[in-house]
Amino acid sequence: WSGGIVKKGLEFGTGKPTNTTDRPGKASAKNSYAAAVDRTDDGVMYAGAGWGHARAEWRIFDAEAKGPNASVGAEFTDESFKAMAKAEVISVSASAGITKATLGLSADTGVGIGKSGVEAKFLGTGFSIGRKTGFSLFGSGIEFDFSKW
């Protein structure tokens, strides 16, 4: 989880693709932030907070920088199970279309399994195979999001 309620390309907790090809440009910056979601009726719970977050997006391109942050999330549905905790010192990421690269230092730990694939991470090192396929090492990595096709 990226620490936000709406993930790039997928609406958080729904697995529904979002269309980004005609997306207008916008940018935002926050000193501090916090978010919580408790949709127990459809099995999604999330809480996160952090300091320093800047984001820019235009069409299929995204760039993001985050300072120290932490989050925890869980999703239990008929089609998937996910549980993840994240503590991040700093990160920068850039994406274009289905490709996303991240450079950072984090300790993501958790697992996910469902129709969309399998994910496992321990202290920021792990993999995902499925609609999102990638690997990470201590919070830095590359990911290909095939659900955006």
Image: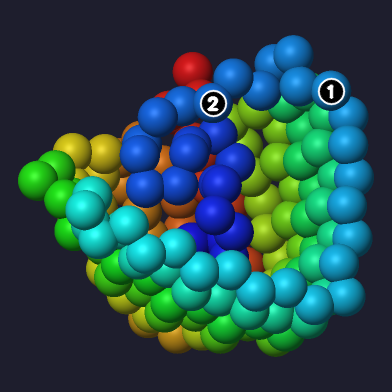
**Which residue occupies 57% across, 82% down?**
70
Q: Could you say which is closer to the camera, residue 39 or residue 92?
A: 39
- Disc 2 on helix, strand or loop? loop
Count the numbered circles shown. 2
Crowd band around label 1 with a 10 angstrom C-alpha radius: few (<14), some (14–19), many (20+) = few
Q: Which residue is mark 1?
A: 24
Q: Could you say which is closer to the camera, residue 138 or residue 86?
A: 86
Which residue type carries mark 1? Pro
Q: CA distance from mark 2 to mark 1?
A: 14 Å
Answer with left or right where residue 70 lies relative to residue 20.
left
Q: Quadrant of residue 57?
A: top right
Answer with left or right where residue 134 lies relative to residue 97.
left
Answer with left or right where residue 110 lies relative to residue 5.
left
The correct choice, above or below, for 19 with respect to 75 in the image is above
Q: Quadrant of residue 96?
A: top right
Q: Mark on residue 38?
A: none
Answer with left or right where residue 54 lies relative to residue 79.
right
**Which residue occupies 35% across, 39% down?**
14
Please say whether residue 97 is visible from this viewpoint. Answer: yes
Q: Which residue is mark 2?
A: 18
**Which residue occupies 70% across, 16% down?**
21
**Which residue occupies 73% across, 26% down?**
60
Earlier residue among tags 2 and 1: 2
Crowd band around label 2 with a 10 angstrom C-alpha radius: few (<14), some (14–19), many (20+) = some
Q: Could you say which is closer to the camera, residue 50 or residue 92?
A: 50
Give residue 117's position: percent from left, percent from top. 25, 44
Please say whether residue 133 is visible from this viewpoint. Answer: no
